[in-house]
Image: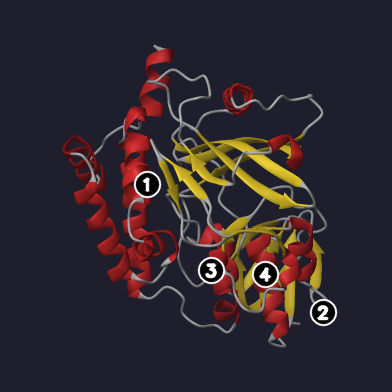
Amino acid sequence: MTADVVVCGLGPAGRALAHRCLARGLSVIVVDPAPDRRWTATYAAWADELPGWLQPTAIAATVDRPTAWGTRAHRIERAYVVLDTARLRESLDLTGAEIVADRAVELTSGTVSLASGRLLSAQRVIDARGIARSPALAEQTAYGLVLDAQRCAGLAPLFMDWRADNGAPEDAPRSFLYAVPLGGGEMLLEETCLAGRPALDGTVLHERLVHRLRSRGIELTGAERVERVRFPVEGGRPGRRTFGAAGGFAHPATGYSVAASLAAADAVAAGAAVWPVSARAVYRLRAAGLRALLALPPTDLPVFFDAFFGLPAAAQRAYLSGRTDLNGMVSAMRTLFVSLPPTQRRRVATATLGMPIRSPIRMRSAIMEE
């Protein structure tokens, strides 16, 4: 029997796609080595990115105007939501799908070979297994702790906070504080390396987080729930046979992919083309933005984000979320570029054009190894 669709991978992207295929009445097979595994990461999105079909119960908390810090505070005029991971997973119901607990080892346009030796056939095969880690790929890493919100009294929700109170030397690779409510009286405080090749490891981020929180009067007991994050922010392959991070839906400069995948799931389920020329051009420009971030010296990052969060709200939205908005993306990058100090402009221009500049993190690592 040939199914309409085989989806390989049951993370948020793969599960959302399978769910929307089922909603269209398609016959669906899903393949994952551990289809019942819980999702342990915290997912968040800009409220205006989410599709109308998503159940409201999947949202754990909403921040109407989150704050970002470079060298000064910026109020972001855009609602930000934190998803309830368990409810999100439950809302993406797979009733009616054939769920195969196995590992896909070879995919073609119409078949999937499994580790068990079974061969699946379908009109469409879509790879939503994410991106395999590689030393060649820039990664985002984070170390977070979940605290009772009352212990964080006075700490406003922070989209990112680059202030230098985490104990790191001034010239060390930078990390920022991410602080968001999780609902139920809890708050996630996370020290994050936005992107590095290699990225900062969890031990360093843990030490920085503890130092930062103590400097702000937040003491830890050691019993807090821990969240660890590590994933590539590049390496996706846009196309009709891939989806989610594997399909280029991860934003190279932020790592966000869940909202973009949810928003595109209906169109992909319908067999529509979701990578027009404009989307591919935006994808390449975002990759150029990642090169620029990797090339900036650590001391430049707070100034860079002062410039970014000083952009008009429409320009920020185009850069962060406008997956097919080529004109908006070009305008945002142009406006950002001219607002940077001259020294940053030169470095950003060089990196954006693709010239070989090693990231500050990698340079520091190489020096230490020598």
Spatial CA distance of label 2 from label 3 is 28 Å
Picture layout, residue 193 above or below residue 282: above
What amino acid type should be assigned to the residue bearing mark 1? Answer: Leu
Spatial CA distance of label 1 from label 3 is 21 Å
Mark 1 is surrounded, within 10 Å at the Cα level, by few (under 14), some (14 to 19) or many (20 or more) other residues, namely: many
> Which is more foreground, mark 1 or mark 3?
3
Instruction: Inspect this view and state whether residue 2 appears.
Output: no
Label 3 near label 1: C-beta < 8 Å?
Answer: no
Q: At which x and y percent is residue 337? A: 23, 50
What is the secondary structure assignment of the residue under circle 1? Answer: helix
What amino acid type should be assigned to the residue bearing mark 4? Answer: Ala
Spatial CA distance of label 2 from label 4 is 14 Å
Q: Which residue is mark 1?
A: 290
Of the residues under marks 1 and 3, which one precedes in the sequence?
A: 3
Spatial CA distance of label 4 from label 3 is 15 Å
Q: Which residue is mark 3?
A: 49
Spatial CA distance of label 1 from label 4 is 27 Å
What amino acid type should be assigned to the residue bearing mark 2? Answer: Gly
- Look at 74% across and 25% down and name the residue there: 220
Of the residues under marks 2 and 4, which one precedes in the sequence?
A: 4
Q: Which residue is mark 4?
A: 16
- Look at 36% across and 52% down and name the residue there: 287
What is the secondary structure assignment of the residue under circle 3? Answer: helix
Of the residues under marks 1 and 4, which one precedes in the sequence?
A: 4
Q: Which residue is mark 2?
A: 96
What is the secondary structure assignment of the residue under circle 2? Answer: loop
What amino acid type should be assigned to the residue bearing mark 3? Answer: Glu
Q: Nearer the viewer, residue 50 or 323?
A: 50
Mark 4 is surrounded, within 10 Å at the Cα level, by few (under 14), some (14 to 19) or many (20 or more) other residues, namely: many
- Position of 301 with respect to 235 (left or right) is left
Label 3 near label 4: C-beta < 8 Å?
Answer: no
